[in-house]
Image: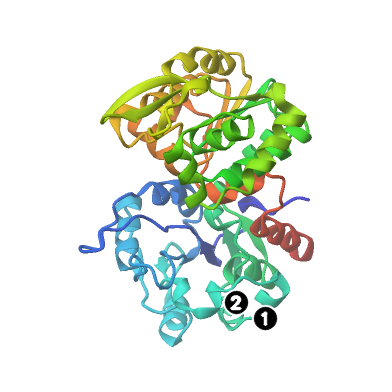
Amino acid sequence: MPIGTLPDLGAEGKTVLLRLDLNSPIDPTSHLILDDKRFREHLPTVRALSDSRVVIVTHQSRPGKKDFTTLEAHAGKLEELLGTPVTYIDSIFGKHARDAVQASKPGDILMLENVRFAAEENLTMKPEDAKKTHIVRRLSSMADVFVNDAFGTAHRSQPTVVGLPLAMRSAAGLLMEREVATLSKVLSGAPRPVTMVLGGTKIDDSIEVAAHVLANGIADNVIVIGVVANAFYIAAGYDIGKPSTQLIEQLKYQGEIAKAKAILDTFGDRVILPSAVAVRQNGRRAEYPVEKIPFDAPVMDLGMDALPALVSTLKNAGTVVFNGPAGVFEDPDFATGTYELLRAASKVGFSVVGGGHTAAVIEKLGIEKEFTHISTGGGACIEFLTGKKLPAVEALEESYQLFG
């Protein structure tokens, strides 16, 4: 089903509620924003609404976390990047906020207070129930139209994400539109062969993606790396040593090993496991084939002997989707696997990265421009790739049906 886009909305001269995801790393002492990547991703959408009264709705962290704070610094950061004044309003939908919106003129940009300061926004609810919340009723009465550009929260079913589109005419922002279009292409119509590289520590998410893309012919093969690979090694009958086995237990992922075995049993020839690993032994990097992983040394990276086969698979791919590192890349001794696979992936014609840690490594390597698309939403991207409909996207589709 289609979703509305900015040209459909005709927002010139109107008051636009603009949902962004500016949730960023913050220094707990100085409250300074440490990484402005998410701000930069949203700039094209904010600029595209320069003839409207823009009222930004966004969040920082969640209740109970150390970085759950006001958005004063966020308004300042956005103003600095835009080169246009952004007025911080220390209210979400109270009289102060309503008066400020009413007094604004086309071209003005206001940023309302952290929307998660309102208890309702922290609840997960069905869109119909979200539409009836106090926060959605108040916010929707303050503006003419709604634009959702917050792909990072697209997998959440919270009031401003799924309730506002049912309450008013809505559209996707430029970032949301690009994310949905690119990830949809991965699921159908991507250049073949399609290789997915699944790593990091979230074994459950990766196994769900692997099962979906292999069963539905979306991916031709899946390379597993990182802690995800460790689960597949156990499923394949290898002994990965005590420290790495214990890590899987600590993360409570023992139940995923049977799922990994089921994938190997059905699609074994399409699942590629690195043939060698690097462990930390006597404080240094040591390499072993997977059949000979030491009992007392933690697996920290894939081994160099495994690289040629993996790089060759990527070289032959028409599409690569990369999500999660190959090891403890923060330690220079164990960054090689992640770095080399990302460099190889960057040369593939259609290359998509699933955000999070992987995006941070790419930026560090200075190769972000070589990838077709780097997603801004790790969780939302993974959920999309498992074939699930994202609540925010469904709400935008429904809004398009209701309001056109």
The answer to whether 308 is drawn above or below residue 6 in the figure is above
Secondary structure, mark 1, is loop
Q: Residue furthest bottom?
A: 95
Q: Which residue is more in the foreground, 393 or 225?
A: 225
Compared across the picture, whether 186 is left or right of 324 comes to right
Q: Residue furthest left?
A: 30
Q: Would you name the residue on which mark 1 appears?
A: 132
Callout 2–callout 1 Cβ contact below 8 Å:
yes
Q: Would you name the residue on which mark 2 appears?
A: 136
Q: Does residue 366 appear in this view?
A: no
Q: Which residue is more in the foreground, 40 or 331?
A: 331
Which percent across, then down, holds residue 190? 69, 28
Which percent across, then down, holds residue 24? 38, 56
Could you tell me which quadrant the C terminus lies in?
Answer: bottom right
Q: Image quarter for residue 222?
A: top right
Which percent across, then down, holds residue 402? 78, 65
